[in-house]
Amino acid sequence: MARVVALTAVGFTALLITTVIGPSLAVAGYRPDLMTLLVVAVAFYDGSASGARAGFAVGLIGDLLSTASGPVGVGALVLLLVGYGVGSLRPYLSGTAMVGQIAVAAGGTVVAVLGYGFAGLLLDVSPADPALALETALAVALYNALLAPFGFHAVGWVSHKFPRTATAVPASPWSPGRVSGQQTRP
Amino acid sequence: MSSRRSRTLVALLALAALVLLTLDYRQGDEGLVAALQRGATSVLAPVQEGLAGVVRPVGNFFRSIADLRDLRQKNAELEAELRLLREGKLSRADLERENAELRDLLSMRQRLGFTTTGAQVIAQPPNAFEWSVLIDAGAAQGIEAGMAVINAQGLVGKVIDVTWRNARVQLLTSPNAGYAVRISGTGEEGLLTGRGARPFQLEILNPEAEINQGAQIVTRVFQGTTIPDSVPIGEVEEGRRGGSRFLAVRPYVDFSRLSLVQVVLDAPVAPSRLDPNELIPDPDPPRPPTPTPSTPASPPSSSESPSATASANPSPTARPTRTPTPSATGGST
């Protein structure tokens, strides 16, 4: 329960940062997508189920706070799939922790942004130009990749301080703080 | 098993998301989901507002870093604009000063009643021991050597050299030139000499004359010159009652800031001697005495000759006049 509260606090902080000082962080008009970065990090450390839950919750909050981006549920659906996908890919990820984090963050962000664009196109709420959508996806992915070490560190710190129970989903092999009973890297 | 649970969970969550999406899409702004949206916004808005007040300076800091290059460019542009504005302000102040100066000059010209031509001082003396300036008007404007140069305050000097386009003016401060002057209030006559940066020296012809401090000195017509009469020069710094014949005169003209001047084109030349050809014969010459046998004839003395008297004191109507030359009137203001 404490872990859920802690992750909620991290998510809330990311939400506030995104909505309050996000415009100040814009470079060439592109802002980082901290919500997606958070979902990817949770999925990276906790697996597909946690990633899906986190994605749904974060996406739903984003939808509720955003009245212009489309119907409520789009963000929840997109981030749900991203979180689940990243969690599902976790056993196949290799390399150093940092490279893995950056790659996952970038890939997850590209999928999320393109997913938003595709959903908007499908629902006719934000008929974005595909080229523009791709450009935006790459730019935001680059930004998120740069911020990935910090985002992953924050989520890893929460995982370390508030460990899951031993019966839960196996932890990430690159978790910064492994707890007893967790599965080691295959 | 775990994977199956995960898939089930994902399927349920996806279904929930699609239900929400469908509800919101169908109900629009009046539906339950839209109400939830408004509620979430109203709940989080104060938090966002409070946080924004706290972190805005931080955000501005990051934004400043991101915009540093633009800020520098903007700063350079603004500085350039400011420089232009300052230059414009200076130009405007200069124009206002010039305008006031021209008005004063016009006033002086109208007061003296001369035909003048305006000129700009284009070169100051090259060294501290040369008291002359170059003006941008010359023979083309009708200027001739010896003409008086004035400005709004009074007499500046006289023209000594003339080219077609320029003229050199010997300033009143030059020790090499003397001017016939008088005290405007009393009519006492004197000779004024420049002394460079120091006040003029006035030599009073009448050693017994009483001169008060602040007495105004003006020019007087002197034979052989074209300096007009009654042009202000300055005022006596210290009065006197007898004693020294020399007085210090403070000039009206600020010779360190000469800018616009006027050259008097049509001041009459005071003749140094009368032209015999222009003498008007006496309409009623005295008849030679008729010799009578009783009175012997005697020749009249030259000192009593009417013609001699007439030539020595010509009447105003008989005064020779100077015919303005075309160059003297051309280009006048």
Image (tube, rainbow, N blue to C red):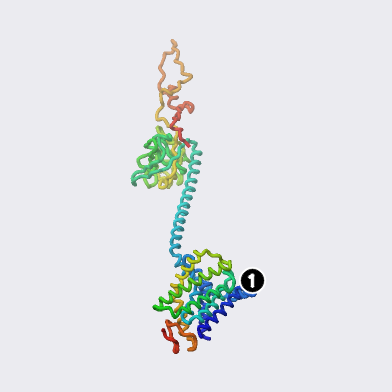
Q: Amino acid at mark 1?
A: Arg
For residue A5, above or below residue A125: below
Residue reaching furthest top?
B293
Give residue B157's quadrant in the image.
top left
Foreground pick, B153 / A182: A182
Q: Position of residue B328 (x, y in %)?
A: 44, 32
Q: Is residue B111 above or below residue A71?
A: above
- Residue topped by disc 1: B26
Up-down: is B119 above or below B323?
below
- Residue A69 image offset from top left, x and y in percent: 57, 69
Label count reads: 1
Q: Is residue B38 left or right of residue A8?
A: right
Q: Quadrant of residue B220?
A: top left
Which one is nearer the viewer's eye here, B10 or B192? B10
Answer few, some or many: residues within 10 Å of disc 1's Cα (few below 14, many 20 plus, some between 14 and 19).
Answer: few
Chain of the residue under label 1: B
Where does the C terminus of chain A fall, quadrant-wise?
bottom left
Asked which secondary structure carries label 1, the reply is: helix
Is residue B60 visible in this depiction of the protein?
A: no
At a point 38% along the width and 45% down the height, the residue shown is B124
From the viewer's side, name the closer residue of B146 and A98: A98
Q: Is residue B77 above or below residue B330?
A: below
Pick whichever, B59 or A49, lies toward us.
A49
Q: Position of residue B305 (x, y in %)?
A: 43, 22
Q: Can the viewer see residue B139?
A: yes
